[in-house]
Image (cartoon, rainbow, N blue to C red):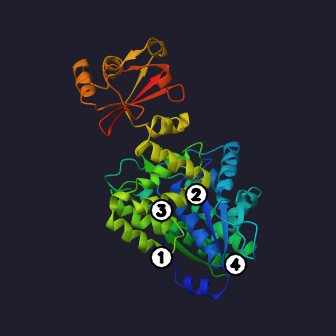
Amino acid sequence: MVQDIMPGTEEQLTKEMTTGYVGFDPTADSLHVGNLLPIMMLVHLQRAGHRPIALVGGATGMVGDPSGKSAERNLLDEATLQKNIAGVTKQLSRFLDFENGENKALLVNNYDWMKNFSFLDFLRDAGKYISVNYMMSKDSVKRRLTPDENDTSASGMSFTEFSYQLLQGYDFVHLYKTFNCKLQFGGSDQWGNITTGTTLVRKMEGGEAFAFTCPLLTKADGGKFGKTESGTVWLDPARTSPFAFYQFWLNATDEDAHKLIRFYTLLPEETIRQLEEEHAAAPHLRALQKAIAAEVTTRVHGGEALQRAMEATEILFGKSSVEDLRKLTADEFAEAFAGVQQATISKADLRAGLSMVDALSAKSGFLASNGEAKRELKANAITVNKAKVAEDFSLTEADLINDRFILLGKGKKTNFVLIAE
């Protein structure tokens, strides 16, 4: 999990209980799976007997971090920031112990020490220690000011964003003075900002500070980790349901799964090796993916949500009946078949009784013609809510799942959803 590490960091961690921190800018009211990697690093730090600090950037969130960005980010108003901070704080408490032990976790907000810091005081107390040449040498700045000739999205950088690394660096100074914090870590794109902090600690306080970063994960196909066709995978169940969250991990490629199980679970190495052997012997059973999905979903959403997600998965993709389908909530049904072709029908048609031939072709377009519909029905290839039906079958309101959906199927793999309105 370590990509870059400052000399002396390992010796410091071996020598004594060390306080270390990660910063999270509250750009949304929820963290996402990309944030889970630095969170897991905080978890490991605490499990090893050190003291973790989770810093929520109420102040730096007002400025916007240029790292990894090709254009200026929209600034958030204070009310939105406070809402976001509350959401992020609640999620962090599911991972870290903030209550018990000498190394209990701390949660801090840099707005608390920056809000009364005047511009002139900041320039005098912090700005004089870092040269413009030093700030210009950071990759996050260089990429924006001297973009690649093929990069047409880069748009320069405002003084606001240029100052971000100085603000983040001062956070390290404050935490060093207040909590004897000697370590900062985060994603590899943060290396420039983090080392600015270690430089300020040394120059302003005469202290010694350390740093390491974790790699930025990408999927085996080169795509951004934590992104799906439907968008970002969030930790908030209102943004990404526990079912969709579980499916995200379950659908990881075999190549990615070998990394993810080490990065995102706390399973012992021996257990991981056993799972890898099981997976190699029967890849179709997806032992690695199921282990990752179970542990991460439980940690983020709880055991009950995991059970619901597993039951829904079995109902939808395993052998199941109409009774099993009726156990799904309307949201679970809609999410599970979000990518499946759909058509709208009227409840009036169902009250009158809708013939299967019409339901398959004229009313839905699921099949190309009445002739194709009749052939598939005679071949016993059509299902309604997982049950085989014949040509003389008619759809009625009694077939609706959650008073809204009917699941049509052709063969083992082709599904179609009718939505009654």
| Contact flag, marks 2 and 4 (Cβ < 8 Å) | no
- Give the Cα separation between the discs numbered 2 and 4: 43 Å
Residue 20, compared with residue 295, is above or below; it is below
- Give the Cα separation between the discs numbered 2 and 3: 11 Å
Label of residue 291 in the image: 3
Provide residue 225's location: percent of width, then percent of height.
43, 56
Which one is nearer the viewer's eye here, 248 or 402?
402
Q: Residues within 10 Å of mark 1 (few under 14, many from 20)?
A: few
Sequence-wise, the earlier of marks 1 and 2 is 1
Corner quadrant of residue 56: bottom right
At x 46% / y 25%, what residue is drawn? 419
Corner quadrant of residue 373: top left
Label of residue 205 in the image: 4
Q: Which residue is mark 2?
A: 298
Q: Secondary structure at mark 1?
A: helix
Sequence-wise, the earlier of marks 1 and 3 is 1
- Give the Cα separation between the discs numbered 1 and 2: 20 Å
Corner quadrant of residue 202: bottom right
Residue kind at label 3, given as amino acid type: Ala
Sequence-wise, the earlier of marks 4 and 1 is 4
Residue kind at label 4, given as amino acid type: Glu
